[in-house]
Image: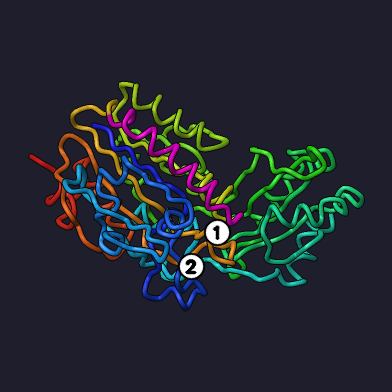
Amino acid sequence: MRVFLIVLDSFGIGEMPDAAAYGDEGSDTYGHICERTGMRLENMIALGLNNIQGVRGKKFANGVTLFPAAVPQGAYARLAEKTPAKDTTAGHYEIAGLVLAHPYRVFQKFPSEVVRALEERTGVSFLGNEAASGTEIIQRLGEEHRRTGRPILYTSQDSVMQIAADTSVIPLEKLYSICEEARALMTGDLAVGRVIARPFVREGGKFVRTEDRKDFALEPPGRTLLDDLYAAGVRVTAVGKIKDIFCGRGISESVHTGNNEEGIAATLSLADGAQDGFIFVNLVDTDMLYGHRNDPEGYARALLRFDDALPLLRRKLREDDVLIVTADHGCDPTTPSTDHSREYVPLIICGDRVAPVDLGTLAGFDHIALFVRACFSLGADGEIYDRVMRR
C-alpha cells in the first residue's frame, strides 16, 4: 500500500485556546482568507474541510459562510498541537510522532557574544541581527550588503537563524558554509530548530529571493515515524523540505522542489509509480510566499491550485492507498503579524477504504503518526484507524 501525507504549510483553521499567550488571539488562516477573498476550496470541502468542528457553519461579518458538505467524502478532524510552539520544526516533529516538551529557542535578536563567535568562525561580519520579515529586510539592507559584502542576519517568532546574501556578492556555496558554521554553533542552550540560508538576487530594481534556500536542521531528538517505517523496510519518500527538517533521517529517497508547482508535480508523478511506501510532502508556498508576506490573495491562489490538483491525485490512488492532508501551524496573512500563528490544523483522510467519519477535535498532531503506523501494521491506533478504515 501507499500512504500520501501532504502538509499544506501554515494552513491553520482557527485560534487554539492558548493563542493569546503567543500573541495570536483571533487568528484564523483559513477563515480569514475566505472572508477576504471569497475563496472556495470545492474539492477539500467535498472531503469534509468545512465539516470540521470549529469550521462548520462559521459566518463572517461580510456574509461569507463556511458551508459544510451535505455528505462528506472523507474522514476529518481538528488537531490541537501538544508541543508549546508554533513553528515548522515542532509541527512536523509532532506530525511524525515526536512531541517536544521544551521547544527550541526563539530569539528577538541574537546575543552579542553569539554574533561575535559566529563572525570569528566564518570570517565575516553581519548586518541586521533583528526579528524581521525576510522579504522586507533584504529590501532595506540589500544595498548596504552589496556595498559592504556583509551578509544579513535575522530571525522571526519561529525558532530560526536566517542568513541572507546576494549570490553575486557571496556565492551560494559560501553562504551554505556560513550556515553550516552557524548550525554547529546554535546547539545546546542556544539551539534553534533551523538555520536557513536565504540567497537572493537583484532583479528589476528590487531584491528577490531565489529557490536555492537551504535548511540546516538539528537531528530529531528522538525516534520519529520515519525512523520506524524505514527500520521496518517501508520505503519513505520525502518531497520538498521534509529531508531538511528531519536531516535526512529515516528517508529512502528525497525529491527536491523549489515551489508548490514542482511539489504537486512530484506527488502526481509518484502516484503514477508502482512503488509501495510512505510519501511525505511539504508544500511551502502558502507559508513562505504568502503567509509571511501578509498576502491573502496569493495564499488563496496557492490553495486553489492544490485544490484543483486534488481530483487528479485521487484518481491516481490505488484501491488500498490512503491520502492525508494536514498542516503544521497557522500563518494568518490578514493580521498585522507576519509570523506563524498558534492555530488548530485540519486533518482530512480519504481513499477507497476510508469511511467518512467526523473525528471531532483530537489533542496532538501525533495522531497522524499513530494512524500511519497502523496503516503499515506497525502498531494499533484506536483513535483513528479503527474508526476510519473499512475492513
Q: Relative to residue 103, is residue 214 drawn left or right? A: right
Name the residue that disc number 2 marks.
Answer: 103
Residue 81: name its quadrant.
bottom left
Pick the quarter of the image with the N terminus.
Answer: top left
x, y (%) of residue 25?
46, 74
Is residue 377 visible to us here? yes
Quadrant in the picture for residue 118: bottom right
Measure the alpha-carbon separation of dots 1 and 2. 8 Å
Instruction: Decide if residue 155 is on the left or right side of residue 23.
Output: right
Horizontal and vertical percent position of residue 339: 57, 62
Residue 210, x across and y down, in percent: 68, 39
Q: Secondary structure at mark 2?
A: loop
Location of the C terminus by quadrant is top left
Rendered image: mark on residue 193 = 1
Magenta includes 298? yes
Name the residue rendered at 41%, 70% in the picture: 101
Badge 1 amino acid: Gly
Kindly identify the amino acid type of the residue bearing the numbered disc 2.
Pro
Q: Residue furthest right?
A: 147
Which residue is at 16% across, 51% downward?
A: 357
Q: Which residues are magenta?
A: 293-314
Compared to 362, does 245 lie above or below? Answer: above
In screen coordinates, is 37 left or right of 53? right
**Along the line of sight, the residue nearer the viewer: 38 or 187:** 38
Query: Vertically, is 183 above or below 255?
Result: below
Residue 98 in sight: no
Q: Residues within 10 Å of mark 2 (few under 14, many from 20)?
A: some
Q: Nearer the viewer, residue 108 or 262?
A: 262
